[in-house]
Amino acid sequence: MRVFIECDDLVGVLSRTLDRTRRMGIKVGAVIADTGKARAGLELVVVDPDRSASDTLRKRISLIEGVSSVSMRDRPAPHLPRRERVAPTAEAGDARKD
């Protein structure tokens, strides 16, 4: 699940959000910050929360001072680009030798 937060104070909101997720026992897989807009944006990749925990988390984040909006998506398309492979891997049936 991904949580999108628009806020005024990036560092303060991130700190409070991570504190709330830790207290709730929710694991965060990644944090992506965007400061290219008039307002700062945060994207958190949350690892498999149940529905009630994610609803509670959304409500608690929205109460943080400086947060202007919070939205969540269950399974969006990947945001981060995949890294290119350095070397090809040998798959089953591939008997090439360099």
Image (tube, rainbow, N blue to C red):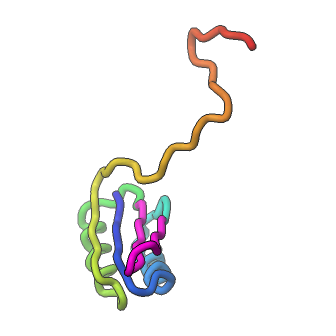
Viewer-closest of 30 and 34? 34
Position of 98 relative to 61 (above/below): above
Indicate the quadrant where residue 86 lies.
top right
Residue shown at 49%/61% (left/top)? 30
User: Where is residue 61 shown, x and y percent of the image?
Assistant: 33, 79
74 left or right of 84?
Answer: left
Position of 54 relative to 96 (above/below): below
Position of 62 relative to 48 (above/below): below
The residue positioned farthest toward the bottom in the image shown: 65
Residue shown at 40%/61% (left/top)? 46
30 left or right of 59?
Answer: right
- Per the picture, the main secondary structure of the magenta-coloured stretch is strand
Quarter occupied by the C terminus: top right
Residue extent of the magenta highlight: 32-45
Viewer-closest of 68 and 63? 68
User: Where is residue 3 shown, x and y percent of the image?
Assistant: 34, 66
Residue shown at 44%/86% (left/top)? 9
User: Where is residue 29 shown, x and y percent of the image?
Assistant: 48, 59
Quarter occupied by the N terminus: bottom left
User: Where is residue 73 shown, x and y percent of the image?
Assistant: 28, 59
Residue shown at 28%/55% (left/top)? 74
